[in-house]
Amino acid sequence: MRKPFIAGNWKMNTNNAEAVALVSGLVEQLGEIATVDVAVCVPFVYLRAVADTLSSSNIALGAQDVFYEDNGAFTGEISCRMLKDACCTYVIIGHSERRHIIGETDELINRKLHTAISGGLLPILCVGELLEQRQADETNEIVTGQIKKGLEGIDAEKILAVTVAYEPVWAIGTGLTATARQAQEVHAMIRSLLGEMYGRDTAEQIRIQYGGSAKPANTAELMANPDVDGLLVGGASLKVEDFSAMIRTVA
Ligand code: PGA
């Protein structure tokens, strides 16, 4: 059985005081939730403050990106070691905003994924199609390409460190959500692809999150799908009430 995994992606939001208030609120609301894995992926500069606030809780900490080198002359970048040092367990890799606004390629994402896994972080690999790609019926082809290239060279042992997040780009921050059926179709396709790549037993153990305007009102419907194992939550993760309501629904 796959344990549900709900992660908040704060993106470029909050200040130090808001970050601490947000996680303090979550700790208070959720207590020791044991049936769901919960993580918050916060801006780099607030990791330490959030880590201190989370220290006695089982909410895990994550970052939103990582660089593929350990140290050196890479101005502005943050390494896996630095993230471990800041108490991170998870790291989001290949989020659509990094692919489409910053210009990250599948090759770069693949390098980051290798580094994260060998450095002991648990990556959340994001994939998903643009609106025009869905309209042109290219969703499966796009997502298949992103998964194959993103996971190149990752063997069956290492893949178990990875969570895949299917996030249709047209549903991110737009208020549009994939219907439960649209989500399940792509999630099932991803699981079958992972089965071809790693064997069915392994594919059955890999968690696939849905992301894109997930909120309290659609959590139960999305999570009722057999291949939806969790949620990657943007906007709604910035509100203590909303994010904890989603987690309680899943628990
Ligand atoms: P959203 O973002 O929930 O605000 O749509 C999800 C994400 O980008 O991870």
Image (spheres, rainbow, N blue to C red):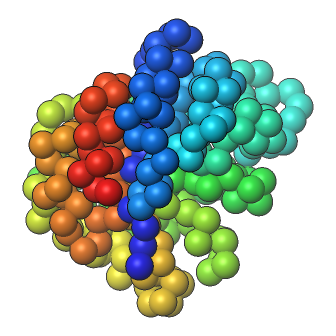
Query: Toward which corner of the image does residue 220 lie, by quadrant?
Result: bottom left
What residue appears at the point 52 percent right and 9 percent down from the top-left corner? 17
Q: Give the image location of residue 120, x and y in percent.
A: 74, 56
| Image position of 207 with respect to 58: above or below | below
Extreme-right residue of the structure: 72
Extreme-bottom residue of the structure: 200
Q: Count numbered badges in the picture.
A: 0
What residue appears at the point 47 percent right and 34 percent down from the top-left corner? 27
Q: Nearer the viewer, residue 51 or 125?
A: 51
- The quadrant of the image that shows the C terminus is bottom left
| Image position of 163 with respect to 108: above or below | below
Q: Nearer the viewer, residue 9 or 146?
A: 9
What residue appears at the point 28 percent right and 56 percent down from the top-left corner? 250
In the image, taking residue 226 as reference, residue 122 lies left or right, namely right
What residue appears at the point 12 percent right and 43 percent down from the top-left corner? 217
Query: Toward which corner of the image does residue 134 lie, by quadrant?
Result: bottom left
Q: Give the image location of residue 141, x and y in percent.
A: 31, 67
| Image position of 243 with respect to 230: above or below | above
- The quadrant of the image that shows the N terminus is bottom left
Q: Give the image location of residue 231, x and y in percent.
A: 33, 51
Q: For residue 251, say whether it is visible.
A: yes
Q: Give the image location of residue 100, x and y in percent.
A: 40, 36
Q: For residue 128, say whether it is visible.
A: no
In the image, taking residue 232 as reference, residue 105 lies left or right, namely right
